Amino acid sequence: MFQKVLIANRGEIALRILRACRELGLSTVAVYSDADRAAPHVLEADEAWRLGPAPAQESYLRGDLILEIAARTGAGAIHPGYGFLSENADFAQACEHTGIKFIGPPSSAMRILGSKTNARQAADEFGMPRTPGCVHALASPEEAMDVAAGVGYPVMLKAAAGGGGKGMRAVHRPEDLPSAFASASSEADRAFGSGDMYLEKLIERPRHIEIQVIADEHGRCVSLGERECSVQRRHQKVIEEAPSSVVDQSLRRRMGDAAVRLALSAGYTNAGTIEFLVDKKKKFYFLEMNTRLQVEHPVTELVTGHDLVHLQIRIAQGEPLPFTQKDVQLRGHAIECRIYAEDPANGFMPSPGRITRLLQPGGPGIREDSGIYEGWVVPVDYDPMLSKLIAYAPTRDLAIARLLRALDEYVIGGIRTNLALFRRILTDPDFRAARIDTGYLDRLLAAAPSAQAIGSNGHGDLPAVAAAALFEATKNIANGSVLNGNGHASPWKSAARRDAVGGTD
């Protein structure tokens, strides 16, 4: 049993884990780079320790330093969140050797399923259908050319370690493969500390469906349903929802059973996600396993009622799962938007800088997992995700309506964001009809230039517009004049305002 948890991450996920620890009565230790000295997770934690300069290789990827801090603070466990060291089997093994609990799978299971190539070998041994391609790390671009020639173009190059869209390149012509290999390998090395690549056949226009599993250390593993992750840009998920509109009870059961069997065969424990591609005939293909908590875990929490971070911590404490597969029921619909500091009108370039104005949404069915505050300077050194905005409702249509309403309430001033992009998606007829696949967003963006996504927040320069609107509203209130929904002064509201401020006609 442990009483203190070191959170080896940053941003919204570090704050999410910190809150779960606090709810469970556990003390927390935050770690930070120089760029994150004033980050919310640093300010909220019971203790905060500096790692080093801003580059991840000198801070959040310093497993040796993180273990040293854990020992010095008496932390009995480390939660890695997602990204950084979360799928690093060597780091998990180092935790085991030092007697510090790694809140995730054992290193042995991670070596089998966390490596994308090893996971593909395990899928073959298990007889699970998978995308054609190699099951080992490619030694060179020349070997990649040979494999690609065997499976046929188009192909996908992917990082063997890690995920999140990093280290991935679609290649449609042989002459493009060497440069794609070099750039993808370099990107993977910077993100995950490993440049190993593998290659698979690119299946065109599939649905990207993933199954959430959770396993305790007593031999029980259950599936918590699926998430639809087909709305992607450059292989990076943009919107996720649960459940999927294309998955019926039969497909959900078959995919869930396959995911659970694969996890159990590797001795997997804690939270993990098995990703599949599903074609038009509802045939599914194993893609990879993410041996960690996912960015999109909130949608599963909302439709199942189970707190995944609580479960992760309790499993790491040795507790059995408090429910069985037959207890798992999906209720309602949840949709998540990943809010990024980026400029859709300028090729989605990152937009670091100071947040000068922040109005956050709320109301029925709205959840926001955020790692920012007004005055916070968004660093240029890391993934530019600011927050996750999630809507939950009894139906998909109402979840979309709530999400659109929340987006209209959301103001982030001083930097560019992708809020306008979500309004385009959520009002698009194909999305509303769930006619989506992994190429959907690329087609939507190609059909209408990104510059048409006016401004950073969908209403031109929204911070300026909002400030002007606030000023005008203040003047109207002071003058005893409040406009109704048709743009006319409401006599009833005007009278009430006059009474409240002691005004006269």
Image (cartoon, grey):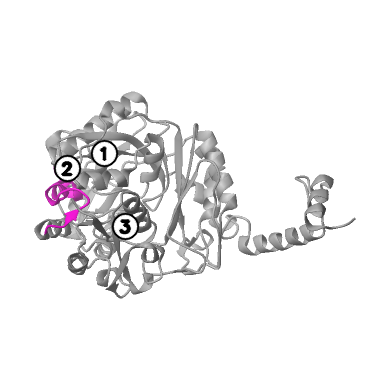
Indicate which label's residue lies in the foreground, 3 or 2. 2
Q: Secondary structure at mark 1?
A: strand
Report which quarter residue 319 is drawn in.
top left
* Image position, residue 425 (x, y; %): 52, 45
Disc 2 + disc 1, Cβ < 8 Å: yes
**Residue extending farthest right:** 505
| Stretch of the chain drawn in magenta | 99-121
**Residue extending farthest top:** 250
* Image position, residue 452 (x, y; %): 59, 55
Q: CA distance from mark 3 to mark 1?
A: 23 Å
Q: Residue 354: in sight, yes or no? A: yes
Q: Residue 489: in sight, yes or no? A: no
Q: CA distance from mark 3 to mark 2?
A: 24 Å
449 in relation to 284, above or below: below
Label number found at residue 213: 1
Q: Nearer the viewer, residue 89 or 103?
A: 103
Task: Report the residue marked by disc 3.
Answer: 166
* Image position, residue 167 (x, y; %): 29, 58
